[in-house]
Image: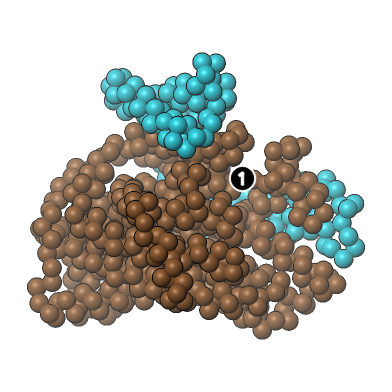
Chain colours: A cyan, B brown
């Protein structure tokens, strides 16, 4: 995004927050208020105050906030690809189970960020998955999602 | 008070808890020394590991990780010019020049001693101050509690990088997220989008994991740097050469501890600001200010003591008022609530034995970190050799398994993922995660007390302004907004803003 123009990334973020506040304010009209007592301010009042606060502060930040001192690097393909892998990982976990989905997700992320030789990537993905599975499933007895193979 | 503390030590001084504190301190030092692993992020990742522990064991582990991480960040700052966490950034100013001059041993000895003194002073102040504060806070009614929450928000907003409005917008976003779920008075569903899974609200721990840990993964992906070469590592501890040098060390340690405590008792301020202010104060008070930036020992002792003092001091508002003093203590608050312990004025009435055991754990953790730091510097420094690419993949797995373990359902995983992506996008836009977490913590408190106040007063808003304590808190909140912007206009010698990635 152009850093020298008025429409910077920081301003875009604040405008997005403003839009989110407006959306929540609008959604608050759909809340059931019929059960509220006459002495209470009701279930919609506080959300509307918070939404109003978000809209007001983000709008003021658009005009008065100072620019970020250290500018982040621009988005790149690797980042988008890694985010996509993480989303797919969440989709796959209940279907393939924790072990299979974690091994594949970690290997894909490491391959995307060019973490080195394939055997290193495979070793790390297997080792990390085995370690977390052992600690959570066996030691802490947290039932992790089982796949078609039972783990 | 002493009886309670003795009881706390009696509770914790068993092999089981000492083992937990030792492991926690070692994990903390290692994580703190690893660039990219923030203290709050480390704590958020570790919370799921405490699910099956009892409350004392869980809090002892997290308190020792917190204490260890604060020290670990300074190791990599001194040896590698790479702070493990933002609060250690100031240590690079003089620590790294000392290492380059062949004085790494002296710098590390000074740091570990300053850490012990700062940590102990901060914990002593916590023990002495929190009980009277909690007793005073018991007198708070809805108007005072509402004012307290407003004060907490303005303090955080006033200190965020980029100005008050960006900070308040972030806090308001956190507040708004807490509106999801059943209305606490009428039971009406709010913003659940028809999902019964969201009736209980947005899960807090997965949100923390996403905001602090998963967003860190995306930040690490955008960074190209790999590991840093380990050099100038020395294990030769070097003590003060003369009595006057020892006096100087002690003087600046106590100054640093005082600054750290003063800053950290204000909700939302945290260790980064404390260490930066302590550095500025040390330069003002030093007899050799011209050496600052070139390897001045006061330049590392003072901020290190301030940094460690914030661990205990940040728990004063957390335990006494139920308001976290820093991002890390906000995560600790999540751990408290997870074990059915609600921080705030009633904590000494309902869970005194747990709180005293926590205080005892903090005392012990300070000595354990001192011992580990003294002997294990070369080992811990090697943690920084872990390639970032493997580190980020490991964090992804820990985030997913940790979030899942929180509720044993995929809603928790999706919450962590959503907060991770949103947190990353906001961080790029200069919005820190700390005010969002404060909003998540304060949302229910603000709503409950506002509605109680309205019911008591029959709908009169003036009720919120009738209490002197509430007015005092509003004035303090207003000052918190005005003072940082006034300091900013005067271009102070040291920054007074929370960076985007605090603690």
Residue B191, quarter of picture: top right
- Res B271 → quadrant: bottom left
The residue located at (10%, 57%) in the rendering is B236
What residue is shown at x 44% (from left), y 21% (from top)?
A104
Quadrant hosting residue B415: top right
Q: Which residue is mark 1?
A: B203
Chain identity of mark 1: B
Q: Residue B32: give x, y in percent of width and height.
A: 33, 51
In front here: B240 or B429? Answer: B240
- B130 relative to B447, above or below: below
Q: Is residue A71 left or right of residue B73?
A: right
Expressed as whole percent of the image width and height from the top left, the position of residue A80 reads 48, 30
Give the residue drawn at x 71%, y 71%.
B142
Tell me: B295 left or right of B47: left
Do we see residue B54 in this rendering? Answer: yes
Q: What x and y, as percent, mark residue B249?
A: 21, 74
Residue B502 in the image, given as x and y percentages of width and height: 43, 56
Q: How many marks?
A: 1
In this image, B418 relative to B229: left or right? right
Residue A58, placed above or below residue B7: above
Residue sitting at 58 percent across and 77 percent down?
B135
Task: State the SS at label 1.
Answer: loop
């Amino acid at each position: 995004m152009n850093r020298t123009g008025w429409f910077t990334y920081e301003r875009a973020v604040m405008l997005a927050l403003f839009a989110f506040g407006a959306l929540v304010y609008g959604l608050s009209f759909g809340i059931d208020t019929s059960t509220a007592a006459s002495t209470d301010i009701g279930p919609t009042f506080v959300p509307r105050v918070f939404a109003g606060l978000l809209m007001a502060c983000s709008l003021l930040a658009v005009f008065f906030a100072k620019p970020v001192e250290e500018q982040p690097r621009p988005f790149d393909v690797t980042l988008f690809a890694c985010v996509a892998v993480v989303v797919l990982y969440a989709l796959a976990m209940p279907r393939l189970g924790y072990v299979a989905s974690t091994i594949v997700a970690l290997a894909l992320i490491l391959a995307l960020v060019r973490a080195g030789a394939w055997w290193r990537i495979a070793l790390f993905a297997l080792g990390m998955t085995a370690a977390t599975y052992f600690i959570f499933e066996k030691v802490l007895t947290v039932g992790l999602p089982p796949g078609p193979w039972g783990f | 008070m002493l009886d309670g503390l003795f009881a706390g030590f009696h509770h914790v001084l068993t092999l089981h808890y000492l083992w937990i504190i030792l492991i926690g301190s070692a994990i903390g030092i290692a994580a703190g020394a690893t660039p990219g692993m923030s203290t709050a992020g480390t704590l958020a990742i570790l919370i799921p590991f405490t699910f099956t522990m009892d409350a004392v064991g869980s809090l002892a582990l997290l308190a020792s990780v917190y204490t260890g991480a604060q020290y670990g960040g300074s190791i990599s700052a001194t040896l590698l010019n790479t702070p493990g966490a933002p609060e250690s950034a100031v240590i690079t100013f003089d620590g790294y020049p000392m290492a380059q001059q062949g004085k790494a041993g002296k710098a590390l000895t000074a740091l570990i001693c300053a850490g012990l003194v700062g940590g102990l002073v901060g914990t002593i102040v916590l023990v002495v101050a929190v009980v009277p504060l909690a007793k005073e806070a018991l007198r708070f009614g809805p108007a005072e509690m509402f004012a307290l929450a407003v004060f907490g928000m303005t303090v955080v907003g006033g200190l965020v990088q980029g100005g008050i409005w960006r900070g308040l917008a972030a806090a308001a976003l956190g507040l708004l997220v807490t509106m999801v779920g059943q209305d606490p008075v009428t039971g009406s569903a709010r913003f659940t989008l028809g999902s019964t899974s969201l009736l209980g609200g947005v899960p807090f721990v997965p949100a923390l994991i996403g905001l602090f840990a998963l967003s860190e993964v995306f930040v690490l992906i955008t960074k190209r740097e790999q590991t840093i070469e380990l050099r100038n590592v020395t294990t030769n501890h070097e003590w003060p050469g003369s009595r006057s040098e020892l006096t100087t060390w002690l003087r600046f340690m106590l100054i640093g501890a005082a600054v750290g405590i003063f800053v950290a008792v204000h909700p939302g301020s945290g260790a980064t600001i404390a260490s930066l202010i302590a550095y500025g104060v040390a330069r003002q008070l030093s007899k050799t200010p011209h050496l600052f930036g070139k390897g001045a020992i006061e330049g590392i002792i003072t901020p290190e003591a301030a940094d460690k003092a914030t661990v205990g001091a940040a728990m004063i508002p957390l335990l006494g008022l139920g308001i976290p003093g820093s991002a890390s203590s906000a995560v600790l608050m999540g751990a408290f609530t997870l074990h059915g312990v609600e921080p705030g004025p009633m904590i000494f009435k309902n869970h005194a034995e747990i709180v005293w055991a926590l205080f005892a754990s903090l005392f012990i953790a300070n000595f354990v970190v001192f011992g580990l730091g003294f002997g294990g510097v070369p080992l811990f420094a090697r943690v920084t050799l872990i390639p970032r690419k493997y580190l980020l993949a490991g964090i992804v797995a820990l985030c997913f398994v940790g979030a899942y373990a929180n509720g044993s359902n995929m809603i928790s995983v999706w919450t962590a993922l959503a907060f991770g992506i949103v947190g990353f996008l906001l961080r790029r836009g200069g919005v820190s995660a700390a005010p969002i977490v404060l909003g998540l913590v304060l949302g229910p408190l603000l709503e409950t007390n506002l509605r109680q106040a309205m019911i008591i007063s029959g709908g009169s808003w003036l009720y919120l302004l009738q209490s002197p304590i509430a007015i005092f808190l509003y004035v303090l909140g207003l000052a918190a907004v005005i003072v940082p912007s006034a300091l900013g206009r005067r271009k102070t010698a040291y920054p007074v803003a929370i960076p985007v990635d605090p603690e």
